[in-house]
Image: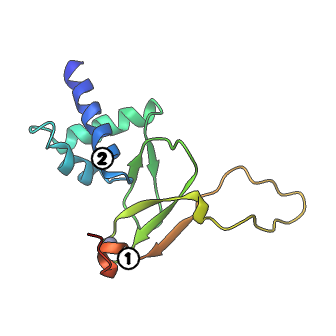
Amino acid sequence: MERETKQRKAIFRVLEEQGRPLTVEEIHRHGREYVPRLGLTTVYRSVRAMIRSGILLGLQYPGQPVRYEAPSRSEHIHFICNACGKLYDLPSSHKEKSMDLPPGFVVEGEELIVFGRCADCAGIREG
Ligand SMILES: [Zn+2]
């Protein structure tokens, strides 16, 4: 129980520090900085348990590995870099305005994903 809490904390910390949805492999790689003996299977198990309790969300896009994030405090859209494959959160202000819906249609949610190159891969590094 104690150990499990420590692992979950590490997973949250990693997601917070990276600031973008991560695959289990990415969580595992960064998580070992906090829990050196953290195993990949353990991360899988913790992530699954955290999804069941609703404290993590899985993101599944076609042709992409499943990535995980904490349920968002605000709406945002996702950006996938075609070069490095990382997925980033973009503020929703980038979102286009309302769409035209056929009469009688009601939107209950949306998932917008943008593809391109991140600053690192486009060669525009800051600093
Ligand atoms: Zn990139």
SS state under label 2: helix
Q: Is residue 64 above or below residue 10?
A: below
Query: How far is the residue under mark 2 from the one under mark 1?
Result: 22 Å
* Residue bearing mark 2: 17
Q: Between 9 and 63, which is closer to the camera in this rendering?
A: 9
Label 1 neighbour load within 10 Å: few <14, some 14-19, many 20+ = few
Residue under the image location 29 percent in, 32 percent down: 8
* Residue bearing mark 1: 82
Q: Position of residue 64 (x, y in %)?
A: 40, 65
Q: Is residue 88 above or below residue 41?
A: below
- The residue most toward the top is 1
Label 2 neighbour load within 10 Å: few <14, some 14-19, many 20+ = few
Q: Position of residue 15 (x, y in %)?
A: 33, 45
As shown in the figure, which amino acid type bears the numbered disc 1? Asn
Residue 104 located left or right of residue 99: right
Number of marks in picture: 2
Looking at marks 2 and 1 on the same chain, the residue that comes earlier in the sequence is marked by 2
Asked if the beta carbon under badge 1 is closer than 8 A to the nearest atom of ligand 1, the reply is yes
Asked if the beta carbon under badge 2 is closer than 8 A to the nearest atom of ligand 1, the reply is no
Q: Between 74 and 21, which is closer to the camera in this rendering?
A: 74
Q: Between 125 and 17, which is closer to the camera in this rendering?
A: 125
Residue under the image location 32 percent in, 38 percent down: 12
Q: Quadrant of residue 107?
A: bottom right
Q: Is residue 39 above or below residue 124?
A: above
Ligand 1, what quadrant?
bottom left
Residue under the image location 46 percent in, 57 percent down: 60
* Eye-nearest disc, 2 or 1: 2
As shown in the figure, which amino acid type bears the numbered disc 2? Glu
Q: Position of residue 52 (x, y in %)?
A: 44, 32
For the N terminus, the quadrant is: top left
- The residue most toward the right is 103
